[in-house]
């Protein structure tokens, strides 16, 4: 059995070579403007969690595998999870595997790569008050029709919060780097990536990286910027593993909401009876 790689406390992810647009060739902002942009992004990250309502959404994770030197990806299991975000904390319940309800008994699905912290841990570790990331200007870029300021960042091992573990065989804290795409007017982050570096050989892992894309989502009568897509990529000694994730069906979660699951495994809510 191939050992599973688990990412603890922080989410490592897929670093993709996004195509550049004409905005990338604009003149960079002067140092003072760069400082202002970064300050706005830090402030946004500091207040991100407190600005979110309690909500429920559905996370669909498609698992793919390929040979280490191959680009022919083979589909693995598709996992459907109900995710509850309540008072800043994430709770997940796996409800479907390959479209079928999860039954009690021995686990019959494969999870070569487990990730967590998609909603706020990444933002907090890179841009929060305790961030030790070093930022450099990269470029202007148009993302989904919006002009974005793109900064690259790096965090050395001494200040890293990225911990990788290979089952119970090995564990290590590693350095990482990536990029952030921020709205120059508000500091809102619309995309963030990271990639681990200097991974110890004991973890049997050559590379691991992630990317999270945010979009405007209506919950209740307000719009929020929340994850809509994410991906995680892992290169092992003998194969490649990728998780492709979608977040959909956002809706408000109340303290007295009862979660129910229909025959297709889709989550619904009803109000608990008043006592």
Image: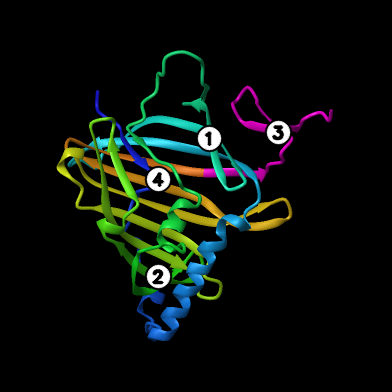
Q: Position of residue 190 (x, y in %)?
A: 49, 61
The residue singled out by tag 4 in the image is 9
Of the two numbered discs 3 and 4 in the rendering, the one whose residue sits closer to the viewer: 4
The residue singled out by tag 2 in the image is 150
Question: Between marks 2 and 4, how big is the CA–CA gap?
Answer: 25 Å
As drawn, 274 above or below 68: above
As drawn, 244 above or below 153: above
Q: Provide the residue span drawn in magenta.
A: 247-275
Q: Residue at x 38, y 81 (%)?
A: 26
| Mark 3 touches mark 4? (CB < 8 Å) | no
Q: Residue at x 40, y 62 (%)?
A: 131
Question: Between marks 1 and 2, how big is the CA–CA gap?
Answer: 32 Å
Question: Between marks 4 and 1, how big is the CA–CA gap?
Answer: 16 Å
The residue singled out by tag 1 in the image is 92
Give whichever of discs 4 and 1 has the lower sequence position: 4
| Mark 4 touches mark 1? (CB < 8 Å) | no
Task: Tell me the quadrant of the picture where the C terminus can be found.
Answer: top right
The residue singled out by tag 3 in the image is 269
Q: Circle 1 — which element?
A: strand
Of the two numbered discs 2 and 4 in the rendering, the one whose residue sits closer to the viewer: 4
**Which mark is on residue 211?**
none
Q: Residue at x 51, y 16 (%)?
A: 103
């Amino acid at each position: 059995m191939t050992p599973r790689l688990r990412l603890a406390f922080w989410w490592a992810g897929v670093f993709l070579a996004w195509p550049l647009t004409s905005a990338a060739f604009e003149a960079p902002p002067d140092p003072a403007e760069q400082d202002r942009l970064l300050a706005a992004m830090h402030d946004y990250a500091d207040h991100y969690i407190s600005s979110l309502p309690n909500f429920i959404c559905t996370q669909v994770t498609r698992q793919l595998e390929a040979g280490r030197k191959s680009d022919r990806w083979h589909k693995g299991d598709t996992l459907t999870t109900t995710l509850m975000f309540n008072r800043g904390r994430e709770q997940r319940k796996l409800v479907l595997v390959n479209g079928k309800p999860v039954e009690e008994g021995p686990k019959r699905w494969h999870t070569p790569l487990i990730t967590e912290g998609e909603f706020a841990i990444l933002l907090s570790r890179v841009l929060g008050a305790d961030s030790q990331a070093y930022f450099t200007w990269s470029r202007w870029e148009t993302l989904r029709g919006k002009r974005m300021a793109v900064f690259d960042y790096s965090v050395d091992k001494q200040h890293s919060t990225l911990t990788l573990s290979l089952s119970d065989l090995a564990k290590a804290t590693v350095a990482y780097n990536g990029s952030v795409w921020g709205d120059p007017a508000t500091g809102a982050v619309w995309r963030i990536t990271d990639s681990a570096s200097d991974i110890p050989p004991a973890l049997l892992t050559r590379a691991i990286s992630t990317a999270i894309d945010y979009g405007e989502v209506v919950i209740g009568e307000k719009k929020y910027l929340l994850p809509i897509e994410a991906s995680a990529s892992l290169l092992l000694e003998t194969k490649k593993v990728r998780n492709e994730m979608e977040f959909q069906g956002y809706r408000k979660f109340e303290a007295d909401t009862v979660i129910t699951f229909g025959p297709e495994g889709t989550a619904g809510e009803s109000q608990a009876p008043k006592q």
